[in-house]
Amino acid sequence: MPPPGDECDGRFDADLNSPVVGETDDTFDWTIERCPGAQGNGWFRNVKSITISGCWHRGDIDSVEVSDGKVKVGHDGTIKVFQLRNDDLPLDVTVKFDDEFLAGEDTVEVFVKETGWPGWFWHFLFTFFQHGHLNADGPVCEN
């Protein structure tokens, strides 16, 4: 859940647990979760994957740990957590970078992909996707 006083807009919330904005660290830890009242029901609005991107590059990342699912780091440094289910939320993502970064406000984009289908017949005709775009605090990169 969002900390007291923190608004949860939409279906999801992404919070930087550490470091605190304004501090530097080589390890950043986020929690991504559903907002209260925005629960999926298993066959409709089922979480499929979560993507986290920022100003870093693939070579800046030492390791990524997730509480559930599998993780892949793209050639551009995008972190994708996949093979998720609704029960995997809240999801903790910890990224250890090679160097320290300053933590800043709204520097990271989090993309939550949901899938679902209204009945087996429609499953064969199409699968529709719903997405949640969020901004979260994270690393500030110097160019």
Image (spheres, helix red, strand yellow):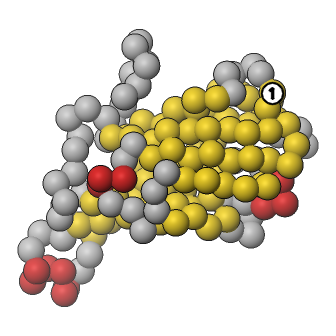
- Whether residue 131 can be seen here: no
Q: Is residue 54 left or right of residue 117?
A: right
Q: Which residue is mark 1?
A: 24
98 or 122: nearer the eye? 98
Task: Check the picture and name the quadrant holding the C terminus.
Answer: top right
Residue at 79%, 47% (x, y): give it: 97
The reply, left or right, for residue 124 in relation to residue 100 is left
Name the residue: 86% across, 49% down.
98
**Count of marks overlaid on the render:** 1
Residue 84 % position (x, y): 39, 62
Most extreme residue toward the bottom, as rendered?
A: 124
Residue lying at the far top of the rendered structure: 5
Q: Is 131 left or right of 137, judged from the image as shown? A: left
Query: Residue 124 location, x and y as percent?
Result: 19, 87
Which residue is depicted at the point 78% across and 61% down?
58
Q: Using the image, determine if residue 140 lies above or below residue 52.
A: above
In the displayed structure, 81 sits above or below 8; it is: below
7 relative to 74, above or below: above
For label 1, the SS is: strand
The kind of residue tagged 1 is Thr
Q: Residues within 10 Å of mark 1 (few under 14, many from 20)?
A: some
Figure quadrant of the N terminus: top left
Q: Position of residue 123 (x, y in %)?
A: 18, 80
- Dividing the picture into quadrants, the one containing residue 99 is top right
